């Protein structure tokens, strides 16, 4: 009789614990938001003129030079780029500047 009681008790424990062993699945949507700060970065490459000869070759002809300015901004922001004339502002030093 004692053995039968242990078996019944073991079966009752298994029956009760078995109901929580089956798990279900559910899905739901998760909302996500972000605030993107307006921002820009600027980088440059050196402006290289090469050999300059103010007495002969470049006495009456300008020496062109090429440089690169790169600006990257977050969507919706804008950059304003200005170039100073440096120490030779009264000589037309930026007369040939152009953007592309």
Image: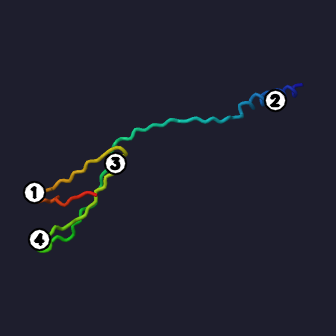
Quote the CA–CA distance across marks 4 and 2.
Answer: 107 Å
Asked if residue 91 is positioned above or below residue 32 in the image, the reply reads below
The residue labelled by disc 2 is 11
Quote the CA–CA distance across marks 1 and 3.
Answer: 33 Å
**Residue 10 x/y as whole percent:** 80, 29
Q: Residues within 10 Å of mark 1 (few under 14, many from 20)?
A: few
Kindly indicate whether the residue at mark 3 contacts the one at mark 1 (C-beta within 8 angstroms).
no
Residue plotted at (85% across, 25% down): 5
Quote the CA–CA distance across marks 2 and 1.
Answer: 101 Å
Residue plotted at (71% across, 34% down): 22
Q: Residues within 10 Å of mark 4 (few under 14, many from 20)?
A: few
Q: For numbered disc 2, what is the local secondary structure?
A: helix
Q: 53 or 19: nearer the eye?
A: 53
| Residue 23 image-quadrant placement | top right
Dot 1 or dot 3, earlier in sequence: 3
Q: Which mark is residue 73?
A: 3
Quote the CA–CA distance across marks 4 and 1.
Answer: 18 Å
Q: For numbered disc 4, what is the local secondary structure?
A: loop
């Amino acid at each position: 009789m004692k053995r039968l009681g242990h078996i019944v008790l073991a079966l009752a424990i298994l029956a009760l614990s078995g109901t929580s062993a089956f798990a279900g699945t559910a899905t739901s949507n998760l909302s996500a938001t972000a605030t993107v700060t307006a921002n820009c970065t600027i980088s440059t490459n050196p402006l290289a003129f090469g050999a300059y000869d103010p007495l002969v070759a470049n006495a009456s002809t300008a020496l062109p030079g090429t440089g690169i300015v790169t600006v990257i901004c977050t969507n919706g922001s804008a950059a304003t780029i200005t170039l100073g004339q440096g120490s030779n502002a009264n000589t037309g030093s930026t007369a040939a500047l152009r953007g592309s």
